[in-house]
Image (cartoon, rainbow, N blue to C red):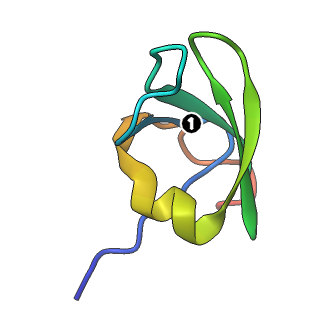
Amino acid sequence: MSQLVKYRVGDVVRMRKAHPCGGDTWEIMRTGVDFRIKCLKCGRVVMVPRPKFEKSVKGVVTSAGPGPADG
């Protein structure tokens, strides 16, 4: 059984393909059906559908940690 990875706002992830600017690390700005992510090299913000985002993530670089709603 595969492990479900929960992504949180503030997490920094490394993507499989680099952005045209050369950066491959992104900060998650919004989660849900679509993810809003920001390139940490050039600052470009893009919206990515959840299935494409989950396939493209190589790994979490830094985690935002538990939020206030996580009891």
Q: Residue at x 39, y 38 (%)?
A: 17
The residue depicted at 41 percent of the width and 50 percent of the height is 57
Q: Residue at x 45, y 15 (%)?
A: 22
Vertical side of 66 occupied by 28: above or below: above
Amino acid under disc 1: Ala
Can you give x and y, in whole percent of width and height, for residue 28 in the image?
A: 65, 40
The residue that mark 1 highlights is 64
Tell me: residue 56, above or below residue 16: below
Q: Residue at x 40, y 74 (%)?
A: 4
In the image, is residue 4 above or below residue 70? Answer: below
Q: Whole-percent x and y of residue 56? A: 43, 53
Q: Is residue 50 visible?
A: yes
- Viewer-nearest residue: 64 or 23: 23
* Element on which disc 1 rests: loop
**Quadrant (top left/top right/bottom left/bottom right) for the C terminus:** bottom right
Residue that extends furthest to the bottom in the rendered view of this protein? 1
Q: Residue furthest left?
A: 1
**In which quarter of the view is residue 40 placed?**
top right
Residue 6 can be seen, yes or no: no
Q: Residue lying farthest front?
A: 20
Quadrant of the frame with the N terminus:
bottom left
Q: Residues within 10 Å of mark 1 (few under 14, many from 20)?
A: few
In this rendering, would 16 be left or right of 33? left
Quadrant hosting residue 9? top right
Which of the 4 image quarters holds residue 15?
A: top left
